[in-house]
Image (tube, rainbow, N blue to C red):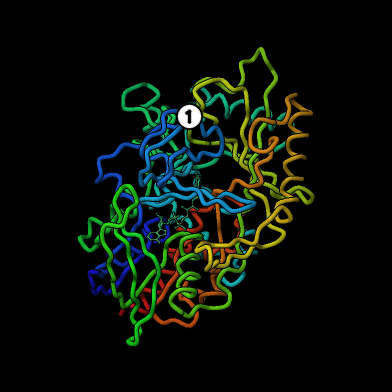
Amino acid sequence: TEMIDKEVVIIGSGYGGSVAALRLCEKNIPVTLLEMGLDWEKSGEKFSPMINPGHSAAWLKTKTIAPFMNLFRLEKFTGALDRLDFEHIKIWVGRGVGGGSLVNGGMAVTPKKEYFKEMFPNLDTEKFYSHYFPLANKELKTNVASEEFLDGCDFYKFKRVGEEEAKNAGFKTVRVPNVYDFKYMEKEYKEEVPRSALAGEVIYGNNHGKNSLDKTYLKKATATGKLEILELHKVNHISQNPDKSYSIDISVINTKGEEIQHKIINAKKLILSAGTMGSLELLLKSKAVAQFSIDENIGKEWGNNGNFMTGRNWVKAFSGGTGFKQSTIPVGGIDHWEDKEHPFFVEIAPLPMGMNVATSLYLMVNKLKKFGEVNYNLKEQKLDLNWDKSHTVHMKDNAKYFLKTMNKANGGTRSHLLFHNGFGADVCYHPLGGIVLGKATDQFGRLNGHKNLYVIDGSLIPGTIGVNPFVTITAIAEYCMEEIIRKDFV
Ligand code: FAD
């Protein structure tokens, strides 16, 4: 076992970890960033498209783990997409330098001000909307596709059909910003540059076009010369030393997932940014196996951000379905959030299967009626999630209402082949909460009962934010790090 001392260590290189790294490095503070996944750019490995899954398709699995159509065998490899399976819910997460930004759809949505205020009554809402959200969007390189391009591009037929049908049904549609560079996509369309979004790349990573964190925050942080990124470093647990520093127990792994070295890094200051499930696992497991002291609120107020997948089979036979060719990058949304009875937001999602399946896919974001709770199961050495059908029954009602309204106006049926009879209550892309800001931490992400331990990631958001969450995670990370650096790093 190798023992190393460090001043500041961050665990996890997703949105929270990348913001923390940049803001510390900018202030000349050396940072060590531990990431269990691969540094894809350095590795020279390519990301694979959905219809031809390769190394990037799954984290150490022998079969693909997409939300549907898992017909492909795989070689075990430290891939970019992972899925955590619980009895009533499956949670997808990104692995690698850049975390979820490597595999996500890039939808960069600022939440509704009223809902943000409801979720975070103690934060300065005005400052968030005048400063932290604009800052996050600028650093993430959020942009919006030109309407002219979308109208003329055959890869966006699914979006035109989806929006037209939504309008027919009386729903309000909205244009959704993204971090995929739409100027690049226009060039892809003209075949002036290599295709990525227009070549079926997304949940197994994009080789071009997407401004994932390795191209934004982490690139800037690396340019300071102060950032050390250690890939394939999987943290097992943490403990506290008598001098109050933190010991981080690490397995260095190869791309087959085998431990090739055991390391202990001692850190004076430790930032947990392992993502909602990762940070929860580290804290709850460390308590169970290393008597690490944690606040009683840890594990509470967890939620799936109201994620619910559904789909419709499209029956206007003569008009050609949703298109043979589909961009992987969503741009359309349906905003039904203000409705009293059935409040929801819908992403009009692509289904880039390489064939015209005449199916519309929708990712719904609903409100939560009841939080879940996360615990550590010492016997089975894994997280337990208190989450069942009772948590999603109102989301299913919303999905039924949505499909009924759409079908009545446009024809079509529920897509019985997708998910469970057309209802994906167990599909979760947006796990949030469990280490809630102002409850398990102070108002800036300092963990209760600890002096030099911070949590900066999606776990700070109490289970729901009403839209796709990474812009909010980034803005909250910016806000927390500003205060933490000012007060704790002088
Ligand atoms: P993450 O981005 O999850 O980063 C955590 C990092 O920590 C990971 O790289 C992980 O490998 C690492 N880690 C975890 N445990 C350990 C450990 N023990 N040791 C070392 N490293 C560890 N959101 C949107 O806003 N818009 C979208 O369009 C969108 N689409 C999505 C599509 C998919 C398929 C998925 C899976 C997610 C999507 N999301 C989307 C969600 C978004 O990606 C996440 O909310 C976001 O990445 C969470 O950020 P984070 O900082 O909390 O953690």
Q: Could you tell me which residue is drawn at 52 percent across and 36 percent down?
A: 330
- Picture layout, residue 103 above or below residue 317: below
Q: Identify which residue, 138 or 405, lies in the foreground.
A: 405
- Picture layout, residue 374 above or below residue 267: above
Cβ of mark 1 under 8 Å from ligand 1: the answer is: no
- Picture layout, residue 169 above or below residue 152: below
Q: Identify which residue, 447 or 468, lies in the foreground.
A: 447
Quadrant of residue 79 in the image?
Answer: top left
Q: Could you tell me which residue is drawn at 53 percent across and 36 percent down?
A: 331
Asked if residue 451 shows in the view, the reply is: yes
Q: Is residue 17 left or right of residue 412?
A: left
Instruction: State which quarter of the image contains the N terminus.
Output: bottom left
The residue beneath circle 1 is: 327
Judged from this view, the residue extending furthest toward the bottom is 242
Q: Is residue 228 left or right of residue 61?
A: left
- The count of marks equals 1
Q: Position of residue 53 (x, y in %)?
A: 41, 33
Asked if residue 215 shows in the view, the reply is: no
Q: Could you tell me which residue is drawn at 59 percent across and 26 percent down?
A: 160
- Tell me if mark 1 has few (under 14), some (14-19) or many (20+) residues whose alpha carbon lies within 10 angstroms of its own: many
Q: Is residue 132 left or right of residue 4?
A: right
Amino acid type at mark 1: Ser
Q: Position of residue 367 (x, y in %)?
A: 68, 54
Q: Position of residue 448 (x, y in %)?
A: 50, 80
Instruction: State which quarter of the image contains the C terminus.
Output: bottom left
Judged from this view, the residue extending furthest toward the top is 318
Q: Position of residue 236 (x, y in %)?
A: 39, 65
Quadrant of residue 6 in the image?
Answer: bottom left
